[in-house]
Image (spheres, grey):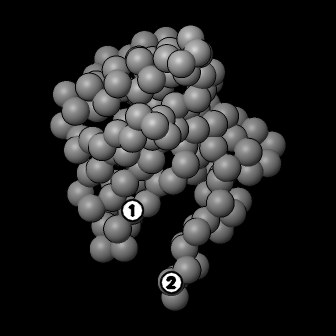
Amino acid sequence: MNARRTHSLERLHYAARLASERGLSVQTDPAARFLSLHHENSTVVLQFDPDSISLIVIEVDDDRRGQGIGSRLLNDVAWIADQTEMPVRLFAMSMIYHEEPGLKQGALCAWYRRYGYEGDSVFLNRPPTAKCLAA
């Protein structure tokens, strides 16, 4: 296994430990370098790449929308990224196929920007910041 992959796996396991200590339910898939965080029937899936964390999906249970669960998960992602000193990358795309259209694309990007994500399109990045204290 090459050194870059080993380093991303070390960060994955470190992040999993941090998330567990923070009270989140955690699942890992080391082969795919995935970390799944679960809170109140909602999930965020991260992939640990050698130089960044990719936010693959954030899904909030229909019954829990509008209650701050997505914000809590996004704050947890930011905290983990800060602790591991890695930027987070994402492709902001609403995947809601229900009767309610959910967030429109522009509103979705604006939501991510409130949490420190930057970018001119749907490809957004959150640079690592100074380490923060656990909330």
On the picture, is 63 further left or further right than 29?
left
Counting from the top left corner in percent of width and height, residue 101 is at: 58, 79
Residue highlighted by disc 2 = 98
Q: Residue at x 55, y 80 (%)?
A: 97
Whether residue 48 is situated above or below residue 108 in the rendered picture: above
Residue at the bottom extreme?
99
* Residue 95 in sight here: yes
Q: CA distance from mark 1 to mark 2?
A: 13 Å
Element marked by disc 2: loop
User: Looking at the picture, which amino acid does disc 1 mark?
Assistant: Val
Quadrant in the picture for the C terminus: top left
Contact? badges 1 and 2 (CB < 8 Å): no
Q: Is residue 111 left or right of residue 63?
A: right
Residue ID at (70%, 59%)? 106
Residue at image position (80%, 43%) is: 120
Q: Which residue is mark 1?
A: 60
The amino acid on which the numbered mark 2 sits, given as a three-letter code, is: His
| Vertical comparison of 52 with 26: above or below | above
Q: Quarter of the image holding residue 74?
A: top left
Count neighbours of disc 2 (C-alpha within 10 A) and say few if under 14, some if 14 to 19, many if 20 or more: few
Task: Looking at the picture, tell me which residue is in the foreground, 29 or 69.
Answer: 29
The relative height of residue 123 versus residue 4 in the rendered view (above or below) is below
Query: Horizontal and vertical percent for residue 134?
Result: 28, 23
Front in this rendered view, residue 106 or 98: 98
| Label 1 Cα neighbours within 10 Å, binned few <14 / some 14-19 / many ≥20 | many
Return the residue found at the far front: 1
Observer-nearest of 121 and 30: 30
Q: Residue furthest right?
A: 120
Residue 75 visible somewhere in the drawing: no
What element does badge 1 sit on? loop
Q: Residue at x 30, y 43 (%)?
A: 27
